[in-house]
Every structure is written in C-alpha cells, then in structure tokens.
Amino acid sequence: MISSLTPDQAAALIKDGDFVIAGGNGGSGSPEALFEAVEKRFLAGQGPHNITLLHITGVGAVTEKGMCRFAHKGLVKRVIGGHFGLQLPLMKMIVENEVEGYNLPQGVLTHLCRAMAGKQPGVLTQVGLETYMDPRQDGGRMNSVTTEQLVDLVTLSGTDYLLYKAPGVPNVALLRGTTADEDGYVSMEHEATTREDLSIAQAVHNAGGIVICQVKRVVKRGSINPHMVQIPGFLVDHIVVVPEQMQTYGTVYDPARSGETRVPTSQIAPEPLSMRKVMARRAAFELRAKDVVNLGVGVSALIPNVAAEEGIEDLITLTVEAGVIGGVPGHAREFGTAVNPRAIMDQGYQFDFYDGGGLTCAFLSFAEVDPRGNINVTRFGKRYDGSGGFINITQRTPRLVFSGSLTGGDLDIDVENGALAIRRDGKFKKFVPEVGQVSFSGPLALKRGQRVTFVTDRAVFELEAEGLVLTEIAPGVRLQEDVLDKLGFAVAVSPQLKTMDARIFQPGPMALREDFLAHGPRHAGRAAA
C-alpha cells in the first residue's frame, strides 16, 4: 500500500541542497498544500535551505501561492523556470541578485524533464537561436550572480543548434493528481491539464529521488481505469490527500474545464468594448477557417472570448501550450486551461507539435519592438518575466500576430462613437531603436519566410524586408501626431494605407462567422481617404 503523509510530513523529506522539481502550470495543477508546507517549515527554522528549484512555467497567483511561497532568502539557491510573471516575489529576488536565476523556454523545460528521465545530456534544438537564450547573448541567465552556462551553441553538419544541458540530478518531485489507488496509481480526471507530471516522476524516480503526489482522494487497488492512469504507482513514493484542493487558482472545480461536461458557448459573457477588445478583435481578423492556433497572454488571451462571441470557435482550433486542444482557452487565473476542451494531452507532445511548425497561426504580445522587427516581451524595467512558451511558439509558426498598445504607461484610451478616442497617451514609446532583450528575432523570421503582423490600439504594421510598414490606422486617429510621432524610429507608410474595419469599433458581434462561411475572413481594413 502506498505511503500516505500529511503535507508537513512530506515537506520534512526535503533536505538542504536538494534539487526539487515543482509541478503545475500557470494556475492549474499546483500541489499547493505541499508548497505551503515547505514555506511554513522553512519560516519555522526547520529548513530546507539552498535548494535548486525547477518549475516549467509561471506557477503562482502573481503575488501569492505557487512559487511565491519559495521566495524567502536562504530557501532557494538556484531557480530554473519558464516564466516568472505569476510569481513576482521570486522575480524580485532574481532582480536583486538574491538567487541564481535561469529562464529557459517552456517547451525546452518540459522536454528536459523527458531527457532527465532517459538520462540524456540535455535537449538539442534550434529553439532560441538568435534570442537571449543563445549563449552569444545571455544564455538564459537572468542576473549577474548566475554564472554557470546551461546552454551551449553546437554545430552539426554545418547547422547551428542550442544544447540545453540537463541542470542536475533531481532529488524530489512535488506533483498533483485527482485520485490515487492504494498502490499509488494516479489519475487526473478533475485536472484541467496533465502537464509533464509523468516525465517529472520518471526523472526523479530514475535518479533515486522521492516522488510526492498530492491528490483529492484514495480508492481501492486497481479500480482506476488503466486508460485514466497518468502516473503508475511504482513511480510514486508518497501521496498527500487534500480533498479541498482547487482545480485552478480561480476555480474550485469546473467540470467543463476537465472535459466531464460541456457548456454552451453562449454562456461565455462577451467582454465589454474597450481598447483591449479592439486589439483582440482586429487580431481575430487574421484568423482563417481551419486554423490551428496558439494564444499568448495579454491582449491575445481575449481572442477566445471574441471567437465565442462571433460564433467561430468551431471553425478554428485553439490550443494552449499546457496541452489543451480545442474549446475556449481561459486567461488570468484560468490561463493554461480551456472550457470545453476537445483533448488534453501532456505538454511535451504539444511542444513537439509547435517546434515542428504544426501551428498555422499564433497570437502573442510584445513589450518592445525595434526597426528590424526584433521583439522584447521578456525583460523590461524591473520585470524579468521570461519567455514561457513564447520562443517555442514563434520559432516555426508561419503566421505570427503580435498585439499591444502603441505606447505604454498611464494610457487613457477608449472607444467613442465608432472611433478610437485617445484622451491621454502613454508616457513611453514601445517601438524603440533597440530592444532591451531579443525574445524574437525579426531577421531570422524573414529568413524563414514567416509573416509577421503587429496589431496595436491605433495602427497595424507588417514586417517586410526593409523593416516595418504601416498598413492600417484606426478611425479617429491622426497619422502623424498619434502614430508616426509616437514611434522611436521611422517606418514606411504603405501606399495602400487603410482604415481599420468600422465593425471593430462598434458594440455587438461583427458577423465574422458569416465572413468565414461565405469566403473566408475578410481583410480588416478599407482604403483610407
């Protein structure tokens, strides 16, 4: 029979200097009771100290929970993660050089778990070339106290690759499921994602470490359908039963996120008309029937809501890097999950698909853009958010749409009478002569033949060989004063400059479904006067 422990007993198994892999993805799959017990034990002076902490991406609720519980000086010596935007206290420690910090692509990290399970030296890939993952730039290192190089540049048959090295021998895995039987076989029927928990368990078990899994309940030996088992019992050393565990950081349990039930998309309330919705609507005009799409955070996370309002969610397939396929992806504390998913698979397989160029289109955000089309979405000011799945997604997808406001800082922009009203512009420019960090390489995208579009609150740009070209402006916007003067560099203006489609700035559906069924999505602009 599997050993059952309390959260405190499980936390006591972590020793000073251990290499801990923490499960969870964004707001889902977090073994929160275990994280809380580790924090409580450390604050009581019982350790552990100086652990290495690896998490795949953004586990936390911004200022609390998840990896935020590990943000105490002396608890963590080194952290390796895919994204830090949902764990601001830990990000602050990295910025202040209080811990060693590595940011590696989310897909690479999930594949590294598989590599460690098979005792491979690491992951060999072209993902991250000519970005800050490249050792010719930062090599994924986040601050000055982080000196060891975990990424090597290698050349095979005349082609450059990056080797992301396995970062050590993992001692402890902290994972989560729904049900464990008496032998420790774990299913995830109430989970909204299955992540890479199997690979983590294999990696830690094969290294002689301890695998601890938090679950909601225990059932009779052998009573779980074998198709439902996600982690076999021989990989699990201990279970911790937490009947009240939440499905996500925002939801106790929604059966429509785990596939047990389906809800009509008409129940998904449309977002009110705003600057952000305007950008999401304009971006949605780039969709085509039968597209297989990934959506990032920020403005792009509103596109599923637009798709649901327009009734086109059944004409496209929206995917989430966590492994969710179909349905309407969530955002904020539900990010990484979806309502009415058609499939939920392990994250590593999703990134195999992404890395191989399987997506037809992706919608992402930007923080800075330079004249060559390079994008920084990872490091700006005192924020070192990291890449998440951004670098994997943008490396091979043929059509990329990046969305964000043209300026930043204390903006006051709204929609009035079918036009954009700029009451107060941003304090700083986001289109700058040189980005602070290269998260996406414009020149490499052009070399690979990718189409790159930038959608802002008031203008649309295309990346061409000569640089950025302005192709559309919003109604009510002045070309020189509101657009060209707000850029940190000169751009070409298309001779066919258009005004964005008026429907984008009107309340109610835009009849995109009719457009799709009649002749595919229409271009979102009309010729400017």
Image: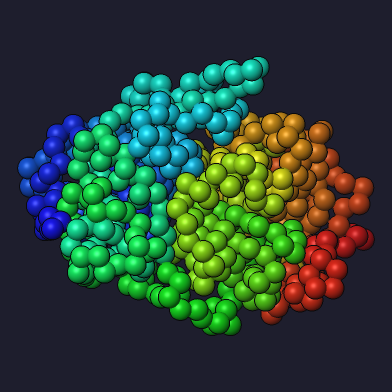
Q: Residue at x 63, y 63 (%)?
A: 317
Residue 264 relative to residue 475: left or right: left
**Residue 61 drawn at (x, y percent):** 35, 57
Color style of the picture: rainbow
Q: Is residue 114 visible?
A: yes
Question: Where, by quadrant of the figure, is residue 419 drawn?
Answer: bottom right
Q: Residue at x 55, y 82 (%)?
A: 264
Q: Residue at x 40, y 39 (%)?
A: 114
Q: Is residue 423 visible?
A: no
Q: How many marks?
A: 0
**Residue 303 drawn at (x, y percent):** 62, 64
Quadrant containing the N terminus in the rendered view: bottom left
Taking depth in this image into account, of 527 and 340 the one nearest to the observer is: 340
Q: Residue at x 72, y 62 (%)?
A: 290
**Residue 126 drawn at (x, y percent):** 58, 30
Quadrant containing the C terminus in the rendered view: bottom right
Q: Is residue 12 above or below residue 121?
A: below
**Residue 345 drawn at (x, y percent):** 47, 57
Taking depth in this image into account, of 30 and 376 the one nearest to the observer is: 30
Q: Is residue 11 above or below residue 104?
A: below
Question: Where, by quadrant of the figure, is residue 458 drawn?
Answer: bottom right
